[in-house]
Image (cartoon, rainbow, N blue to C red):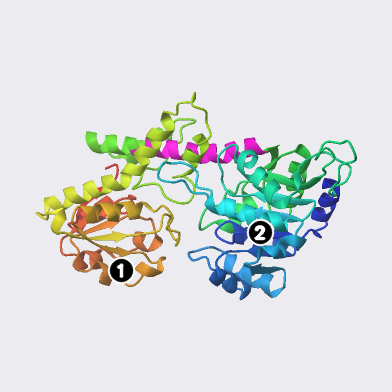
Amino acid sequence: MSLAELRVRVQSKQARLGVIGLGYVGLPVACLFAEAGFDVLGVEIKLRRVEQINAGVSPIEGDEPGLTDLLARVVSAGKLRATTDYRALRDCDVVTISVETPVDDDHQPCYDALRTVLAQLGPALKDGALVIVESTIAPGTIDRVVKPILERESSLKAHVSSVNSQRATPALGETEGANLQPSFYLGHCPERVMSGKLLANVRGVSRVCGGMTPETAQVMVALYRHVVEADLDVADCLTAELVKTIENTYRDVQIAFANEMALLCEDLGADVWQVRELVNKSPHRDMHQPGAGVGGHCIPKDPWLLIANASDGFEPRLIPNARAVNDSMPLHVAHLTTEALAEVGVDIARAKVAVLGYAYLENSADTRNSPSRTLVSRLKEMGADVVIHDPWVADYDGDLCSRVKGSDALVVMVKHSQYIEMNLVAVKDALRHPVVIDGRSILERTRLDALGLIHRAVGR
């Protein structure tokens, strides 16, 4: 199938879509394409998740407006089904890939999941199919990793100009592969979603459609136009890889600056939040919010992905330092906790500390790279007994006051709505000592003072 034919099938919604990976990225994408009228097949390694999706039940916890209802509708309408069997992708004209792409302990890309997916997709890949990687990847990964594996496992060739797309046999005297036709097309359209806003982000945030050829990128635009209401920009694969990793690195660097300013304000005896408000009144200033750490599936790893394939002649300075600042913030919260406990004569080694929030983001169940995990680990290393509460994480939900009862200190790590609205009088009564550490600066200082709570906050 030629790109022109594929584009017609995409525009008429006759193209059959496959979505590999039905997590925070793949599931909303699959649902929205199904809602738009496409027949969508989802492939997922976790059998329990497949069973839930086929029953119309969302496996994603947390506050995700509209996703549960949308999933139930498209499954009921027969537009979306899930399977663990890659062979079912043989009829798919377009396949998107949304799997985890973490970094290892040495900050190098760990593509085990991606490589496994590519190896299993290859034998099932249809002639003329379009493969789109939505996972965030290091610049150069499409060309160095994705394309070679797909070509090897499928015995097809990617993006060789020709009139038709059928496999060709070399004529007598021709070099093997000289007439090999382009049997699949390849592109990269990195996701731009955040937990708690999955459907809204897919619909409303612009995307970069990076194709291995300009014509491929245009077909990608035609596809995503069915579900994306924002700009769809055409680029090559390398540019798309760079844009995604750079935008998250920008955020990481900006947050690191805000965090370092918070530490400076603490040292000098100022309030970083007042300083930030006044700084941002100056034109073209956008000082980010400081806090107890950076988590999630993107920002802690994407700066490392950005520089992973740089040559030995490139020496990154700003990016590793920004990562170090942000990674240190949960440890700073542990220091603030120790300091506040000392004020009431309690040694951290004998203290019971209640940590509020284990997700990385407010009103979400997503615990990936949670700063709370680092804090809890450090507190335990120091000898503290740690209890955790999080209304969105099943292992840690329950009544707040019951969970923190008898604790020597309370540490707020996540801006969950429940913590903003919590009854501080009842919380104080539940604590053994009136100590509160606010890692997200969500509690009013005057209120804490009025209740006689000893408190610390990042940046104050």
Residue on which disc 1 sits: 400
- Residue 364: x and y in percent read 45, 60
Would you say residue 277 is visible in this rendering? no
Q: Is residue 328 left or right of residue 350?
A: right
**Amino acid type of the residue tagged 1 in the rendering:** Leu
227 sits left or right of 173 in the view: left
- Tell me the distance, in whole angstroms, between the alpha carbons under discs 2 and 1: 39 Å
Indicate the position of residue 407 as horizontal and vertical percent values.
Answer: 20, 64
Mark 2 lies on residue: 19
Residue 36 seen in this snapshot: yes
- Relative height, residue 340 to residue 283 (above, below): below
Q: Position of residue 419 (x, y in %)?
A: 34, 61
* Part of the protein shown in magenta: 237-259
Disc with the residue nearer the chain's start (2 vs 1) = 2
Please rate how many residues cluster around mark 1, counting C-alpha atoms within 10 Å: few if below 14, some from 14 to 19, many from 20: many
The secondary element bearing badge 2 is classed as strand
Nearer-the-camera pick, 272 or 402: 402
